[in-house]
Image (cartoon, rainbow, N blue to C red):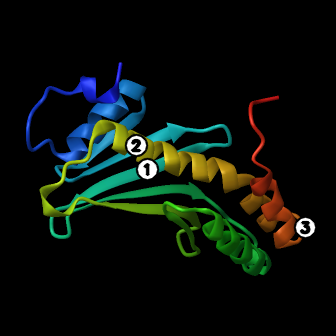
Amino acid sequence: MANSELFLSGEDLHPIDIVETLAEHHDWDFDRVGDDQIAMAVEGQWRTYSLTLAWSGHDETLRLVCTFDMEPPEDRHAALYEVLNGANELCWTGAFSFWAEQRLMVWRYGLVLSGGQVAGAEQIDRMIGGAVAACERFYPAFQLAAWSDQSPASALKVAIAEAYGRA
């Protein structure tokens, strides 16, 4: 069944309503924070990711923020930032940043829906899936940068290899 079949046909579907229906469909834990915001947990291979999606009517943008804890030693921040920059060069949708004060690695993406455009369920599902896939892909590289004595270039090669399947 296509994700769009989950919804009754109708105009003016609120993007966060669509996200809520997707979360229910995928059986993700979620909390509808408000009319324009939802928070959820999505299980990955490496860890559980915290996602927040928020609708801004002001600039007609659906914002996605995907986070996971990252507590690297202070002396490894430079290596982590170098890997983070390398990861961002490889990403076409969204970008990583490290919020040192909150000790969070963050993936951010904004879907602009100006002019009254409406996001489809498939589009939002792909947006969420893309965020989790990016975090899964680069998580090992961030860990190596933070906790090993490998060079940032060597740590980033782990993500570039992109193995397929599971062992």
Q: Residues within 10 Å of mark 3 (few under 14, many from 20)?
A: some
Q: Quadrant of residue 80?
A: bottom right
Q: Nearer the viewer, residue 120 or 46?
A: 120
Q: Nearer the viewer, residue 32 or 14?
A: 14
Find residue 110 and report its horizontal and vertical position in percent.
36, 62
Residue occupying the point 70% across, 71% down: 86
Q: Nearer the viewer, residue 152 or 149?
A: 152
What is the three-letter code of the residue carrying label 2?
A: Met
What is the three-letter code of the residue carrying label 3?
A: Gln
Find residue 40 and report its horizontal and vertical position in percent.
40, 43
Location of the C terminus by quadrant is top right
The residue identified by callout 3 is 150
Residue 51's disc number: 1
Task: Report the Cα–Cα distance between label 1 and label 3.
Answer: 30 Å
Relative height, residue 16 to residue 166 (above, below):
below
Name the side, left or right, on which 22 lies relative to 75: left
User: Could you say whether the residue bearing mark 1 is in a helix, strand or loop?
Assistant: strand
Residue occupying the point 49% across, 42% down: 129
Residue occupying the point 67% across, 65% down: 71
Task: Report the Cα–Cα distance between label 2 and label 1.
Answer: 5 Å
Find residue 59 and report its horizontal and vertical position in percent.
20, 70
The residue identified by callout 2 is 40
Q: Which of the two discs, 1 and 3, labels the residue nearer the N terminus?
A: 1
